[in-house]
Structures are given as structure tokens and as C-alpha cells.
């Protein structure tokens, strides 16, 4: 099957750091995406990892370990506006490189 | 750059009617577009992959005769929900991929309500 798992919900405090984990099936892998989605809106691109290691973009960083089928999204200096769902998506090789999305992690940031 | 639009943003229709949703890439050519459906508090479920000039590829469990997809040009794909029923009420989102990149750019989504 095409499995991708991430926690359903997380809460964190404004100004803190939070790590959202994602595990995926390792066969036919062509990269790992993270998207942010606010309620009622379309997803917006955050990051793309295809090689092992950490990619940093301002307050957001994403890590990938291909051998372990594992990724995480790290959010620093949390702000209230970071309250959203974070979707991990695995790009499948072959065909049209479609994305398989995880169920999403709903992050609630509180004061 | 890489802007994708969808029209309409919201639509309410009666059961048994058909609804067409348009997805356009505004500043790039997209040989491949994807159609997703998202129910409340759930993730995006890929319905089909749309390729310009060829038949769409549907995911398992998606009825191709009910969800008609036409990718007539490199900037436009349409999804027609035929004989809509209340259970088809959902948030429909398209995405487009420029050239041979892996990244997909999402449209703003269409909220369909079938009464």
C-alpha cells in the first residue's frame, strides 16, 4: 500500500519550537513535501526534500532520512498565525509523479 | 509566479444536476494537473491526474463517468461532477505542475454543496 503517517493533532505555545513527524513507505520515492493549509483554504508549499538532511527556510526547516522513511517539519518562534494543518506528502516515482498526502497534523498555537 | 486559479470558488446546486469546475494555470504551462477532494478535517484525496491531450487517469474508487475531466489546453483543466448528490458535497482542489518539476501549485479550491 501507499502509507504515510503523521500525528493528528499537536498543541504548542507561542514563541516555542514544535516538530511534526512524518513516516512514509520507502518504495518508489521521489521526494517529500510539506504543505501548510489553513481551514477552508488550499495548501501552500513549505518545503521539498529529496536528499537526506536538513533544509532550512527562515522559521521553518524540514529534515529527511530516506533510509528510515522519515521526515520532520520544524517550526521555530511559533506565532499564532502558524495555527493550521500541516500536510506531509510523498512523491511517487513513475507515471506523473503524483503526491500521496498524509492525513495532516492540526497544530494549535496558544498564547 | 506559478499561480493557479479555480472557478467558481463556491457553488450550490440541486441534486441531479451537473457542475463544472475550471482550473487554470495563469502564468505557466501545465502538462499535468491533478484533482483532489477534501472532506472536513480530512486530508486531500487524489481523484485523478489530468494530462493535456489525453485521457485522465483516475484513482481507484473514483467513478470516471461521474467525474468527467477534460484537459483541453496547457493552461486549463475542467472537472464536471455529473448527476451530483449530497454526498458529493466537498472541497475540490486542483493543482498544476509546470514541466517536469515535482512541485505542484494549488488552486484556491471550490466548495461544492449539493442540496
Image (tube, coloured by chain):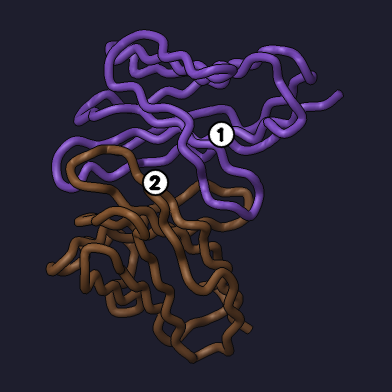
Chain colours: A purple, B brown
The one nearer the camera, A5 or B95, is: B95
Total count of labels: 2
The image position of residue A38, as x and y in percent, is 63, 44
Same chain? Circles 1 and 2: no
- Chain ID for label 1? A
- Is the C terminus of chain A in the top left, top right, bottom left or bottom right quadrant? top right
Q: CA distance from mark 1 to mark 2?
A: 23 Å
The residue tagged 1 is A86
- Chain ID for label 2? B
The residue tagged 2 is B1
Q: Secondary structure at mark 2?
A: loop
Going 48% across and 82% down the picture, which residue do you hit? B84
Quadrant of res A97 = top left
Name the residue furthest right: A111
Q: Secondary structure at mark 1?
A: strand
Going 28% across and 11% down the picture, which residue do you hit? A67
Q: Residues within 10 Å of mark 2 (few under 14, many from 20)?
A: few
* Residue A7's disc number: none
The image position of residue A90, as x and y in percent, is 34, 33
Quadrant of res A49 = top left
The one nearer the camera, A58 or A40, is: A58
- A43 relative to B32, above or below: above
The image position of residue B22, as x and y in percent, is 40, 72
Pair 1/2: label in front: 2
Going 42% across and 23% down the picture, which residue do you hit? A23
The image position of residue B56, as x and y in percent, is 21, 65
User: B103 left or right of A27?
Assistant: right
Circles 1 and 2: CB atoms closer than 8 Å: no
Name the residue furthest top: A53
Going 37% across and 27% down the picture, which residue do you hit? A48
Q: Residues within 10 Å of mark 1 (few under 14, many from 20)?
A: many
Amino acid at each position: 500500500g501507499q502509507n504515510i503517517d503523521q500525528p493528528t493533532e499537536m498543541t504548542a505555545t507561542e514563541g516555542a519550537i514544535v516538530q511534526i513527524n512524518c513516516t512514509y513507505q520507502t518504495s518508489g520515492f521521489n521526494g517529500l513535501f510539506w504543505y501548510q493549509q489553513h481551514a477552508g483554504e488550499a495548501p501552500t508549499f513549505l518545503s521539498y526534500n529529496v536528499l537526506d538532511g536538513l533544509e532550512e527556510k527562515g522559521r521553518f526547516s524540514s529534515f529527511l532520512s530516506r533510509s528510515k522513511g522519515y521526515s520532520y517539519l520544524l517550526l521555530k518562534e511559533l506565532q499564532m498565525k502558524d495555527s493550521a494543518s500541516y500536510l506531509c506528502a510523498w512523491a511517487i516515482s513513475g507515471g506523473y509523479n503524483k503526491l500521496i498526502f498524509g492525513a495532516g497534523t492540526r497544530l494549535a498555537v496558544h498564547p | 509566479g506559478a499561480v493557479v486559479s479555480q472557478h467558481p470558488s463556491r457553488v450550490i446546486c440541486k441534486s441531479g444536476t451537473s457542475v463544472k469546475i475550471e482550473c487554470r494555470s495563469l502564468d505557466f504551462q501545465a502538462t499535468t494537473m491533478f484533482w483532489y477532494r477534501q472532506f472536513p478535517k480530512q486530508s486531500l484525496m487524489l481523484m485523478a491526474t489530468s494530462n493535456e491531450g489525453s485521457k485522465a487517469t483516475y484513482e481507484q474508487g473514483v467513478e470516471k463517468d461521474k467525474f468527467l475531466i477534460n484537459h483541453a489546453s496547457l493552461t486549463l483543466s475542467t472537472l464536471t461532477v455529473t448527476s451530483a448528490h449530497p454526498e458529493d458535497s466537498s472541497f475540490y482542489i486542483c493543482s498544476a505542475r509546470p514541466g517536469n518539476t515535482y512541485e505542484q501549485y494549488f488552486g484556491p479550491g471550490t466548495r461544492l454543496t449539493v442540496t
